[in-house]
Amino acid sequence: MRTITTSNELRSALALQREQGKHIGFVPTMGALHEGHLSLVRCSKQHADRTVVSIFVNPTQFGPSEDFDRYPRTLESDAGLLIDEDVEFLFAPTADQIYPPGHSFSIHAGPIATLYEGARRPGHFDGVATVVSILFNIVQPQSVYFGQKDAQQVAVVKKLIHDLAFPIEVEVVPTVRENDGLALSSRNRYLSQAERKEAAVLSKTLVLVRDLIQKGHSAPAAIAAGIEEFHKLAPHGILDYLDVVGAETFRPAASFEGNEEPITIIIAAILGTTRLIDNLPL
Ligand code: PAF
């Protein structure tokens, strides 16, 4: 694996690969890699000739009171995991490679960025859309790999690629879960032992809501039962939202008729000081 820290060096290395007709797959990450990330890497390794993984904790997607400073930075062990997966290129830039001094442009993600995660984390999806666009321009991959775990991020990235005409295919890789259903996330490491035990409540609530809807219950009735289940299983947890939405627009499914878009059940909750999200496509 070649570890590269500057945009120019990565551009030259990948230009050479493109000249040789190699298909470039790209997995953007913020590091603190776990099996969820590795499933994206494996997918890229399966489909592309060369896999580029970026590790960059992107300051513009964190709000002022969020966990940018304490976000885990584990570059050495991450690199070890990527070597084991036979990744060809690790891009680990410093902030000024991504945001050169004087940088002033950014991408506005539009209405989808104002809902759910976007409403709780103002500016978050603009930051994601901006960094992902910069990375796409540097890497120029044919395919990119994102996890279903961050369903609203997937919707934002798909719309970004569509609206700004990036010639890139998006592959969405299923969520990897612990045995009790907890979706893998770099933030799970913030949970105390007691919070970790309660954290399976997110996936259990999603499964209950999905099962009720599949049995013919209305979305509001299923959500009401889900809220009750959440509080029973996690008496110390705070349920931020539980809803049934269109997977492309994140509009509440109750606001549109029929099969306009696939449906996803989404949940966010706070356990102790840790905010977790999860989702289940219907
Ligand atoms: O999902 C993430 O880790 C980040 O949001 C991403 C896509 C790497 C952009 O910083």
Image: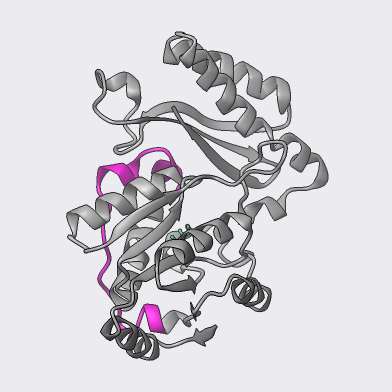
Vertical placement of residue 171 versus 280, above or below:
below
Span of residues in magenta:
97-122
How far from the left and from the top, in percent, is residue 171? 38, 53
The reply, left or right, for residue 57 in relation to residue 257 is right
Judge whether residue 238 is colored magenta: no
Magenta stretch, main secondary structure class: loop
Q: Is residue 99 magenta?
A: yes
Q: Is residue 66 in view?
A: no
Q: State which quadrant residue 219 falls in.
A: top left
79 versus 248 height, above or below: below
Q: Position of residue 86 (x, y in %)?
A: 56, 74
Residue displayed at 52% across by 85% down: 3
- Residue 190 at what x, y percent from top left? 71, 53
Q: Residue at x 61, y 52 (%)?
A: 185
Q: In which quadrant will I find the C terminus?
A: top left
Say which of 104 and 179 sits in front: 179
Residue at (30% x, 51% y) in the render = 158
Q: Is residue 212 visible?
A: yes
Q: Residue at x 37, y 61 (%)?
A: 144
Q: Quick one: which residue is furthest to the right in this view?
A: 193
- Placement of 203 over or under 221, stated as above or below: below
- Colour convention of the picture: one colour
Give the number of callouts. Answer: 0
Position of the N terminus by quadrant: bottom right
> Residue 236 at what x, y percent from top left?
73, 31
* The quarter of the displayed image where residue 116 is located: top left
Say left or right for 25 vs 222: left
175 is higher (above) or lower (below) than 29: above
